Structure formats: C-alpha cells, structure tokens
Image (cartoon, rainbow, N blue to C red):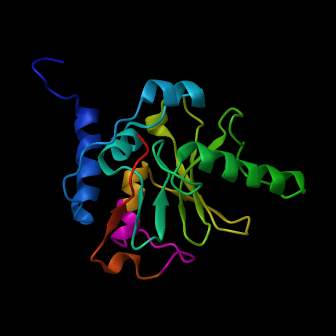
Amino acid sequence: MLGGERSGSQRMTQDAVEQLAQLVRLTYQDRVVVDWVEVERELGRQLPTDYKEFATRFGPGHFEDGYLWVAVPQGEGHRLNFFESLDVNIGVLRDVRSSGVAIPYPLYPENGGVIPWGSTVDGDVFFWVTEYDDPNRWPVVLNEVRTTHWIELDGPMTRVLHSILTDRVRIGFLQQDLGAGPHSFCRTDPRH
C-alpha cells in the first residue's frame, strides 16, 4: 500500500461496518484492542475481515435493547465472548447430533464446520459455514432455537445484521419489528 491507501476490500469492509454504526447511531468510542494473531491461533483459522473490524469498532454489546448479540473476543459471558459462545453453541449442536438429529453442516473444528458469531435473546444462533479457505467468503446461516430449521443468509455478517435491521431480510421467527427503528447498540465494557 502506498502512502496509507487502503485496499478496495479493506475500504469496503470498513464502509460496511461504518454503515452499520451509522444505522445504530453509534457514537465514537475507543477502539477495542484485540490480539487477532492470538485469537486466530487459538481458533486454528482466520476470521472474516468485517467481523474483525466490527469487533474493534463496536466492541462487545447488543442491538435492539438486548435482542441481537454479537460475540467478540473481548466480551464476557456466553452471549458476548467469542470462545465461550463457540464452546456452548457447538456443544449444544454436538449433543443434538449425538441424539440422532441430523445437523446439515459439519461442526467446528471439522472441515467446513460452523462457527457461531451471534445470537438472539430467544436462543437463535448465527453461524459462519467455514467451507472456504478465505474467511471473507464464508456463508452465514441462522439456526432457529429448538428446531432443525436453518436459513442461509447473504453474508458477510455485517451485511446480514444491516439487512435484518433495515427489513431488507425478514425472517419469520425473529422479532417482527426489527426494521422499525430507530436502532440501537449498547456496548458493554470489554475485558482488557
């Protein structure tokens, strides 16, 4: 890169995250420091660029008065901490699969295994399907709580969130007034 220019994909990612920040009227806050090298080493794979930008710009928190949660490395608890969410949600899916219920995707750390990144207060869970080497190509799927119902969504994750919050995508089992606005994001204190 010359003289601080950003690559096209980096600019698009930052623009998408900023569009989401504008939608929820997120005021400027200090960026959350995340050691992505360590996070990705522990996970055993890279994460999507928009997710990493989201995590450092937004930090841990939730949308719409606690309805939509995004798990980031610096969050606390199973809804907000990436690795706790990973353990809990993959554990649940393993239990479901071991009881004889078919899960349509492999489970992390299997090849192409799903990795959770967000949830609703009702327990619906958003996942990436890690079927490509390039994490920026990972599809997003949503699993309805207590069912075998999975919906494929047009990712990346920031586009999914923006589309849901603006009613460009309506999902029958999600809260029906999500697109009504005004929208909010409540940041919790990140771990240091």
Q: Nearer the viewer, residue 67 or 107?
A: 67
Residue 35 found in image quarter: top left
- The answer to whether residue 41 is left or right of residue 64 is right
Q: Nearer the viewer, residue 42 or 115?
A: 42
Residue 108 found in image quarter: top right
Q: Quadrant of the N terminus?
A: top left
As drawn, which residue projects farthest toward the front? 192
Q: Residue at x 27, y 77 (%)?
A: 182
Above or below: residue 128 compared with residue 152? above
Report x, y in % for residue 45. Answer: 55, 28
Res 74 visible: yes
As drawn, which residue projects farthest toward the left? 3
Q: Is residue 90 one of those drawn in magenta?
A: no
Report x, y in % for residue 141. Answer: 57, 55
Give the dominant element type of the magenta stretch: helix, strand or loop.
Answer: loop
Label count reads: 0
Q: Residue at x 43, y 29 (%)?
A: 36
Res 168 visible: no
Report x, y in % for residue 33. Answer: 34, 36
Report x, y in % for residue 64. Answer: 39, 72
- The answer to whether residue 9 is left or right of residue 170 is left
As drawn, which residue projects farthest toward the top? 2
Instruction: Please give the range of residues in magenta.
Output: 162-175
Above or below: residue 125 compared with residue 46? below
Q: Residue at x 41, y 82 (%)?
A: 177
Q: Quadrant of the C terminus?
A: top left
